[in-house]
Image: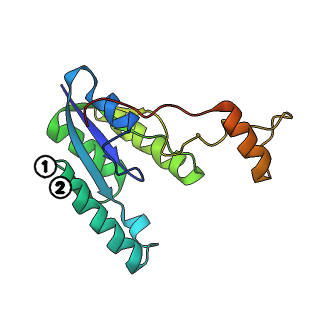
Amino acid sequence: MTAIHWFRRDLRLADNPALLAAAADGRDVVPLYVLDDALLARSGPPRRAYLLRSLRALDDATGGRLVVRRGAPTEVLPEVARQVAADEVHVASSYEPAGRRRDEQVRTALEAAGAALVETGSPYAVAPGRLRTGGGTPFQVFTPFRTAWLAHGWRAPATGPA
């Protein structure tokens, strides 16, 4: 069986719950990064240069296995899933409104291609929205947030093959 791990913000192999979920049950994992023109258009030269260096480092760390494709994720992900016969695409959850909309569109496109989008974990130490005030609203001030975060704790680093 084959799965795809869709790298986005979180370009690390160690302590990556979504990557570990992709590799569960001995699956072969295809590491994929999608250069989305919509995001690249809003990025300046320093950010694009940093991304390129980071992708080169990730490719080196994966032994040259990183697949980089350019285009809309709704088109690229189903195409790659069909090419490698993957039935799942694993990714860390996205929380911003545009990211949630994109992920729902990708989910629909993948389902049409016979694959599932599997969200595991978060690129953040504490997932947005997890901690709330006593009244159930988001924190507005850092110090009470910090106090709640320390009381809540955080998950241990994900362990496993990387």
- x%, y% of residue 45? 38, 80
**Residue at which label 1 appears:** 63
Measuring 33% from the left and 74% from the top, which residue is drawn there?
A: 49
- x%, y% of residue 122? 49, 40
Along the line of sight, the residue nearer the viewer: 125 or 99: 125
Query: In this rendering, does residue 131 appear at all?
Result: no
Measuring 28% from the left and 24% from the top, which residue is drawn there?
A: 24
**Residue at which label 2 appears:** 60
Q: What crowding class fits label 2: few (fewer than 14 Cα within 10 Å), some (14-19), or many (20 or more)? A: few
Along the line of sight, the residue nearer the viewer: 91 or 131: 131
Along the line of sight, the residue nearer the viewer: 56 or 120: 56
Query: In this rendering, does residue 53 appear at all?
Result: yes
Total residue callouts: 2
Question: Where 63 falls versus 117 (above or below)?
Answer: below
Q: Left or right: where does residue 77 sit relative to residue 133?
A: left
The furthest residue to the bottom:
45
Circle 2: residue type: Asp
Question: Where 122 falls versus 25 (above or below)?
Answer: below
- x%, y% of residue 72? 35, 56
Locate residue 92: give its quadrant: top left
What is the C-alpha distance between the residues marked 2 and 1?
A: 5 Å
Colour scheme in the image? rainbow
Helix, strand or loop at disc 2? helix
Locate residue 132: give its quadrant: top right
Q: Are circles 2 and 1 on residues that touch, CB within 8 Å? A: yes
- Which image quadrant: the C terminus? top left
- x%, y% of residue 75? 31, 50
